């Protein structure tokens, strides 16, 4: 499974993705570990897909996570948004 993820991340078409740099520098792995440690998701695939989707929305639309929090799935705990927001904004400030 990790091999599949690595192949997906190294796919050239993925380089046009605005969050490619974050993934390529393994920030996504750190975020997944943090989210699982906080017991927000049991499944690494769920964490990866949710956090990538959310990051992509924030980075491409240039909006805040707060503004999309109310429109997304209500089953997702607020702590998830807070962690992703803090994580990605700290990463973006490093650039």
Image (tube, rainbow, N blue to C red):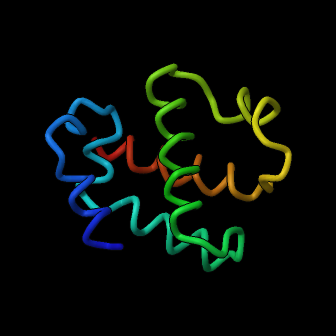
The location of residue 5, given as percent across then percent down, is 31, 62
Q: Quarter holding the C terminus? A: top left
- Say above or below: 23 vs 15: below
Q: Nearer the viewer, residue 58 or 74?
A: 74
The location of residue 93, given as percent across then percent down, is 38, 42
- Say above or below: 93 vs 66: below
Q: Residue at x 82, y 32 (%)?
A: 70
The location of residue 90, given as percent across then percent down, is 45, 50
- Say above or below: 66 vs 85: above
Q: Residue at x 60, y 68 (%)?
A: 35
Q: Nearer the viewer, residue 95 or 28?
A: 28
Q: Nearer the viewer, residue 12 or 22?
A: 12
Q: Residue at x 17, y 52 (%)?
A: 10
Please tell me in which quadrant of the rendered image residue 34 appears: bottom right
The location of residue 44, given as percent across then percent down, is 53, 70
Q: Quarter holding the N terminus? A: bottom left
In screen coordinates, is 71 left or right of 16?
Answer: right
Q: Residue at x 32, y 47 (%)?
A: 94
């Amino acid at each position: 499974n990790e091999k599949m993820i690595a192949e997906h991340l190294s796919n050239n078409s993925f380089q046009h993705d605005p969050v490619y740099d974050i993934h390529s520098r393994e920030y996504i792995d750190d975020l997944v570990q943090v989210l699982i440690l906080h017991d927000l998701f049991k499944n690494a695939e769920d964490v990866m897909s949710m956090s990538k989707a959310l990051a992509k929305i924030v980075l491409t639309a240039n909006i805040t996570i707060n503004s999309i929090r109310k429109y997304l799935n209500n089953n997702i705990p607020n702590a998830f948004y807070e962690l992703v927001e803090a994580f990605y904004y700290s990463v973006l400030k490093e650039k």
